[in-house]
Image: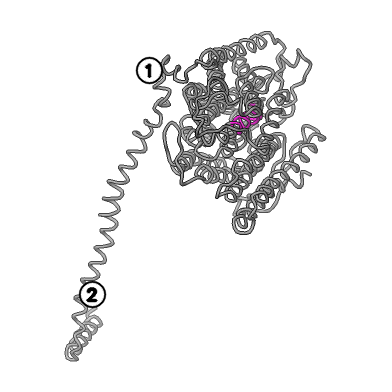
Amino acid sequence: MIQYIYLVPLFPLIGFLIVGLFGKKYLKSETLIGTIASSAIGLSFIVACAAFFQLIGENPEQRSHIVPVFTWIQTGALNINIAYQVDQLSIIYTLIITGIGTLIHIYSAGYMHGDKGFPRFFAYLNLFIFMMLNLVLADNLLLTFLGWEGVGLCSYLLIGFWYDRKFEGSNIVWTGDAAKKAFIVNRIGDFGVLIAMFLLYQVFGTLEYDSINQQAASMTAGGGMITAITLLLFLGCTGKSAQIPLGVWLPDAMAGPTPVSALIHAATMVTAGIFLIARNATLFALSHETMAVVTGIGITTALVAATVGIVQNDIKKVLAYSTVSQLGFMFVALGVGAWWAAVFHVMTHAFFKALLFLGSGSVIHGMHEEQDIQKMGNLKKYMPTTYKTFLIGTVAIAGIPPLSGFFSKDEILWKAFDNGSPILWAVGAIAAFCTAFYMFRMMFLTFHGKERFDHHHVHPHESPLSMTFPLMVLAVLSIFGGFLGVPYALGHFIGVPNILEHWLEPIFANADKILGHAAHHENHAIEYGLMVVSTAIASLGIFIAYRLYYSESSKPTELAQKLSGLYKLLWNKYFVDEIYQNLFVSPIRDMSEKFLWKIFDVKIIDGFINNTAKATGHSGEYIRKMQSGVAQNYAVYMLVGIILIVGYLVFG
C-alpha cells in the first residue's frame, strides 16, 4: 500500500473540492456533507494504516520509501518533485492527523448542526488536513513549505470562520482580528523558513531531506552557517508552534469554532514545528548553540504559559495556554536531543488535548455557548459522559500514572535531568505543578460545586452521540496510549518494551551519533526517584485545587484575592501584548499613517503623478494655441521648420 500513499492527501483534496464547490448549492443535507467530508479523512486513515502495517513487516533499516507523484519544478540544477516520504516518523504523524482528524470531523457534524456556513466549514477542514498531510509526508523542504503555508491559510479561514461575531474572552475581539493576528505573526516565522531554504540549497545543493541529512551526517559539529540555518528554521517553529516570542496568536485563536481549536491544537498545525526539527534532527545536532536556544525557549514558554493558565476563566483559553505549555515541553525534549520523547509527547498530547477541547465544546454546546467557568458548576449532574471523559483527559495531562501524559511528560523531564540539567528538570516540574493545578481548577469549577448559571436562560444537557462518541474513543487512547513508550526504567520493572523509541531509533541514529547519546541506561534508581517526585508534585497541585475549588462553598475569585498583584500580572499575560503593541504595532502603524501615507504616498508619489498631469495639461494648453485654424500661421510654422532643417543639414 505504500506505493498508493498519494491517496492519503488526495482524499481530503477531493472532499474539499466536492463540498466546497457543490456543498451549498447542490448538497442540501448536512448529513450528506458531513458524511462526504468525514469519509474523505477516514479513507486516508485506512490507507495510512495499511502503509503502517506494511512498514512493520519490513527490516527496520529499510523502512523509508520515496513515492514520486510528478515533477513539480525543473530548472537548471534545481529539480523538485511532488513526492512523499513514508518512514517511521511521517507515518506516525500521518496516523495522528488522519485518525484524530476523522474523529473531529464526526464530532463537528453534531457541533456545527444548523450553522449557516456548514458546507464551508467542512470544506475548510478537509483543506486543512490536505495541507497538513503534505507538510509531514513531503520528501523535500519546498513541498513541506507548501503545506506549511497552507495550514497557515486554513487556520486564518477557520479561526475567522464566524467573521460576524465577537469572541467573548478575557478581551473581546472580532474573530477576524484574531484570524489576522494568527496569520501575520506566522508570516514572521515563515520568513525565517524561507531564508533557511535558500541557505540550505546554497550549502547542500538540494532541498531533499534524505540528501541533506546524509551530507550533514558527515559534517563536523559547529559552524556559523549551520547555526544560522537551524536558528532560522527554529524561528519558523516558534511561529507555528506558538513559542516565545511568536506565541501570542494562539490564545486568541480560540475565537474559532471549538472543533477548529481541537484540530489546530491537538493534531495538526501547532505540532508542525516539532515535526520540522525532528525531520532535520541531524542538522540541529550539528549546532550546540541552536540546541541550547531551543531548550531555553521551550522551558521558558512551558513555565510562562503554565503560570498564565492558572488565572484564566475561559474554558478554551485554559486549554490554549496548556497547549502552549505542553509544546514548550516538546521543544525541551528536542533541545536536549530526546527526539523520540518529543514525538511521543506529540502523540499523547494529541489524544488528551483533542479529548479536552472536544469535551470543552460539549460543555459549551450544553451550556448554550457559555465559556466562562465561573458561570458553570455541578455540570456532572447534567453531562455525565462529558464529565467522565473530560476527567480522564484532565488526569492524563496532569501526568498522573498510568495515563498517557505521565509516560511522555516524565520521559522528557528525565531526559532533561539525564543530560546534566537538574535546574531544567526543576523548572519543568514547576510547570507540571501549574498544569495539574489549573486543569483541576477548571475541572472542579466546571463540573463540581454549586450551580452558578442562570437556570431561567441556561438548561445544561448532554451532547448527542455524534459528539460523545469521539470523546469516548479519545478517552481510551488517553488511558492506554502511553504504553507505546514506557520508559526503560519502568519498562524494565514491569517487563514492557519501549515500542515507540525502537520504532523511531533509525530516524534519529545520525543525530544521536553526533550528540554521542547512549541508547540505554543501566542504573534506573534516579529515574524511579524522579518519577515519584514529579508525580507527587503534580498530586500536590491537584490537592491545592481541590481545597480551593471542590467544595460547595468555594469561590471562583478566591485565587485572585490570594495572589493579588501577581494575579494582575498573570491576568494580563505578563503584558506581552501591550509590549508588542507599544514596541512594534503602534510605531509601524504611526509610521505607515504619518509618513508612508500622508507624506510619501500623498505628497511625493501622488504629488509627482498629479504634477506631471498638470504639467502635461499646461503644455497642451500652449500647444493647442498653435492650432489656430489660420492657414498663414501654418505656412509660417512650415517655413521656420524648413529653415531649421536646412540649417542643420548645412551647418550641422
Report the quarter where the C terminus lies.
bottom left
Magenta stretch, residue numbers: 345-359
Front residue (pair 164, 320): 164
Q: Quadrant of the N terminus?
A: top right
In the rendered structure, the answer to whether residue 457 lies left or right of residue 49 reads left
Q: Residues within 10 Å of mark 2 (few under 14, many from 20)?
A: few
Residue 136 falls in image quadrant: top right
Which residue is located at x 53 percent, y 31 percent?
Answer: 316
Q: Is residue 82 magenta?
A: no
Q: In this view of the protein, which residue sits in the foreground, 48 or 395?
A: 395
Query: Where residue 193 sits: x, y (%)?
Result: 53, 40
How many C-alpha atoms fall within 10 Å of the one at disc 1: few (<14), some, or many (≥20)?
A: few
Measured as percent of width and height from the top left, residue 352 is found at 63, 28
User: Can you tell which mark lies on residue 53?
Assistant: none
- The amino acid type, in three-letter code, at marker 1 is Gly
Circle number at residue 565: 1
Vertical relation: 293 (above or below) 589: above
Above/below status of 430 relative to 260:
above
Q: Is residue 224 visible?
A: no
**Residue for badge 2:** 620
Q: Which residue is nearer to you in this view: 378 or 148?
A: 378
**Main SS category, magenta section:** helix
| Circle 1 SS class | helix
In-front residue for pair 125/94: 125
Q: Which structural element holds mark 2?
A: helix
**How much space separates mark 1 and mark 2, taking CA atoms?**
73 Å
